Image (cartoon, rainbow, N blue to C red):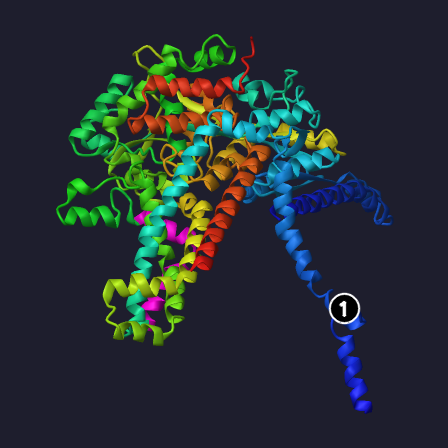
Amino acid sequence: MSQGTALERKMKRQPGAWSWKNSFIHLFPIPALAVYALFIVYPIAAAFSYSLYDWKGLQKGDFIGIGNFVKLFTVEPFNGLFWNAFGHNWYYFALEMIVQNGIAFALAYIIFSKVKGAELFKIAYFLPRLLSVIVVGFLWKLMLNPNYGLVNVTLKKLGLDTWTRPWLGDPETALTSIVLANCWFGIGFSVLIFLAGLQSISQEVLEAARIDGVRGFRMIRSMIVPMMMQSVVIITVFTFIHAFEAFELVYAMQGSQGEPYHSTDTLAVFFYRIAFGGSTGDSVAIGLGSALAVVLFFIIATLSALFMFYVRKKEMDH
Amino acid sequence: MKRMFKSSMIVAAAAALSLAGCSQSGGPSQAGETPKDNGGQKTEQQQAKVKLTMGSWRTEDRDAYEKIIKEFNKQNPNIEIAFNPTKNTEYNTVLNTALQTGSGPDIIQLRPYAAGIALADAGYLEPLDGVKGLDQFSKETLSAATGKDGKVYGIPTVFSSTQIFYNKKLFAKFGIQEPKTWDELLKAADTLKQNKIAPFAFGSKEGWILSLTHGALGPQIYGGTDFVKNITSGKTNFKSKEFTDSIAMMQGLAKYFPDNYSGVSMDDMRNMFVTEQAGMMVMGDWEIAVMKKMNPDLDMDVFPVPPQKADGKASVTTWVDGSYAVNAKSAHKAEAMKFIEFMTTKEFGTLVANELMKPSTIPGVEAKDPLVTKISKYANSISTPYMMVVHFAAGNPTTKATLETSMQGMYLNKLTPEQVADEVQKSADSWFKPAAK
């Protein structure tokens, strides 16, 4: 009987009841939240507030409201450069989706189909990812060198002299060259995610489909891809964010001017240039740079959110 | 986060500087108190020993300046100077913060032109008008550190200078003489081209090479220093025929550039020149040391950019690479001035030319390296200012950067020389106010 009452008391106390022990638990996230607030929330808020001021070099000037945003979208050369870079970001995204993720899916599928030495391939594809982006940029710069680079030398050896060109110096080919180098760099990561998605598919379902006579491309299209939709969504969002943040490789290969003639400019490179200016620190425009950073943040956040929302809705419909 | 880190660094640096300031003023009096029984004379000497600090953004100059200070100490044993450089990209911020709080080094290296002059105009620096030896510098050279009030606030130490480097061996092989006129220059280029040697090691992949090359060759077309005076006083602008012609000249040179030059970078240019695949290169003095390291056997020499007519004046393009000033709040201005005076002597100029391998601003300096001596001589006699660096490195993007990008566009057949000139003028209009208007 005494046991019964003790249990009753415990059960009464549990849901929602206040106790020192329970409330103490809520204190544990505080350090993590503080770090998050300091390093994530504060910089975003700070960039937003900086974008509302006029800046004299590194010194904050008068409050000018949305003046910097208006300048970014209406004053030459900023407006032209913005849309130019914005277009390049979309090109970056599209080419990465087709080349990097297309090839990555094919590779992942081959590995998944139990090829000999699958583990070795997995590591081999992922290897470039271990290099620093600066090193990757340097290597590709060497290979694409117009006069002694591997690419042009090989083309000449094959008798394809007319195909040789200054890959990084020609505005027609510069951006594509950089994005393809980026695909080479990023492919291993996509393979891993796709492989994880493929491995999560229940073998029984695939087996049942096979018995029903589903084969080849139809198998991929109607069975495998829908069942690994989660991975596809993750890859798409990652690629999107990556394409809109594209900076390191462009900077490593073409410098902060998006050379030649702004043909490789992306929003992040454009941001770097207006916010930090030249190496001696002249012509910094913190306000305008912050305004661009805020715009970039909203583009990435809004489009990512819209895409996720759309995918969720589709999943629900199914 | 970056900002937080940066600002905390600034605070730390400012604190360190102000501490250094305290210890300076504390130093001599302490030294005077302790050794009381050591005899009068020694105490006097120690009392007179003053510690100065010297600020700079050139961390790579430390060894050279330590040697220079040692030389200075031979005549001034009682002035101790510590050369304390700050990282290049942080220097402006650290220095400005220190000056605003009333501290900072006693001797300050000033950024050339606008940035350094701004410090003078804000009253942080001591005017140097009485300094002996100031009259040997040209007005143009001193303009790198002349305040709005017309007073000089900094002693220029070295020039950066652009001229034409050439491969002596190749020139001799094809019987080419140092060109004395523009036509001879083009003829030399033709001869090299016929012999399958790239006339100019040049590439348009990196924008700064474009403004540098135009800065060196352009003056002979647009009329050098006179044009610069006219444009800064508002008498002419970039759309003028002279300037447009100078851009068209750059376009015309394209036939003398190497294959695929739109993809050629500075590294490739240097490579071409030191491996004797190119006969000439329009380049700055700072490359001498690098090229000599890459190919010690390279037989190279320099010549100034030749004039269009035989009776014209050849030119090299120069800009001051920094000046040294005295902090107006320094506790030991008299001692700092002594070092500043030393910086105007030939002895100092020779040390600088030998240790830094840079052309000295002091006329008549002989260096161990004959190339440095030659470039110093040109820089002190036939120089014209690098207009884009001296007067047009402002705006956002800077007018200099605008020239670079639009010339890149020109070499890609997207812009005509007239359109390049238009773009440059548009950029200048966005911030530049001519002095006389």
Left or right: A186, with B43 as reference point: left
Reply above or below: A97 against B316.
Answer: below
The part of the image, by quadrant, that contains residue A221 is: bottom left
Q: Residues within 10 Å of mark 1 (few under 14, many from 20)?
A: few
Image point 78% across, 82% down: which residue?
Answer: A8
Residue type pointed to by label 1:
Phe
Q: B218 or B183, which is in the foreground?
A: B218
Residue linked to disc 1:
A24
Q: Is residue B412 magenta?
A: no
Write down the chain letter for disc 1. Answer: A
Image point 23% across, 27% down: which residue?
Answer: B255
Q: Judge whether residue B298 can be spotted in this image.
A: no
Image point 44% across, 17% down: which residue?
Answer: B425
Q: A87 or B63, which is in the foreground?
A: A87
Q: Is residue A124 magenta?
A: yes
Q: Tell me where residue A149 appears, x and y as whole percent.
A: 26, 47
Secondary structure of the residue carrying tag 1 is: helix
Q: Tell me where residue A200 appears, x and y as whole percent.
A: 40, 71
Q: Tell me where residue A223 appears, x and y as whole percent.
A: 33, 65
Please provide the residue range marked out in magenta.
Answer: A119-142
Query: Which residue is outermost to the bottom?
Result: A1
The part of the image, by quadrant, that contains residue B311 is: top left
Left or right: A28, with B434 as reference point: right
Reply above or below: A251 against B242.
Answer: below
- Quadrant of image for the C terminus of chain B: top right
